[in-house]
Amino acid sequence: MAKALLGHVGGSDPRVLAEMRRLQQRVQDLETQLLRVQAENDALAAAARHGDSVLDSIDMPKAEPALT
């Protein structure tokens, strides 16, 4: 019984350690990707806000109805 407990609690399985390292790397990669996408989204949102002000300044006549 004691050997079973020590084997269970004792040394870690190399496969479990390798999987844990792989998952930690995956989390780090996803966090990096999230930061990159958030920065890209912020840049696009800023460009869209700037673009809206340009479109608002254009004097356009009343839109005509679409042909059906």
Image: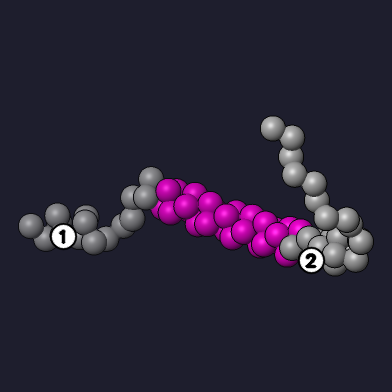
Along the line of sight, which residue is nearer the eye, 65 or 5?
A: 65
Mark 2 vs 1, N-terminal side: 1
Q: Residue 1 at what x, y percent from top left?
A: 7, 57
Mark 1 crowdedness (10 Å alpha carbons): few <14, some 14-19, many ≥20: few
The type of residue carrying mark 2 is Arg
Which residue is located at x 24 percent, y 61 percent?
9
Along the line of sight, which residue is nearer the eye, 18 or 31?
A: 31
Q: Residue 57 at what x, y percent from top left?
A: 90, 66
Which residue is located at x 53 percent, y 52 percent?
26
Which image quadrant for residue 59? bottom right
Which image quadrant for residue 49? bottom right
Callout count: 2
Q: Residue 13 at what x, y percent from top left?
A: 33, 50
Boundaries of the magenta span:
17-44
Note whether residue 14 is visible.
no
The type of residue carrying mark 1 is Leu
Q: Is residue 9 left or right of residue 30?
A: left
Which residue is located at x 64 percent, y 55 percent?
33
Disc assigned to residue 22: none
Q: Secondary structure at mark 2?
A: helix
Q: Which-is-in-front pick, marks 2 and 1?
A: 2
Note whether residue 41 is visible.
yes
Mark 2 crowdedness (10 Å alpha carbons): few <14, some 14-19, many ≥20: few
Q: Gap between marks 2 and 1, in whole Å?
A: 63 Å
Q: Residue 36 at what x, y percent from top left?
A: 70, 58
Q: Is residue 68 left or right of residue 3?
A: right
Disc 2 target residue = 49
Q: Is residue 52 left or right of residue 22?
A: right
The magenta stretch spans residue 47: no
Q: What secondary structure is the stretch in magenta mostly built from?
A: helix
Along the line of sight, which residue is nearer the eye, 11 or 26?
A: 26
Disc assigned to residue 5: 1
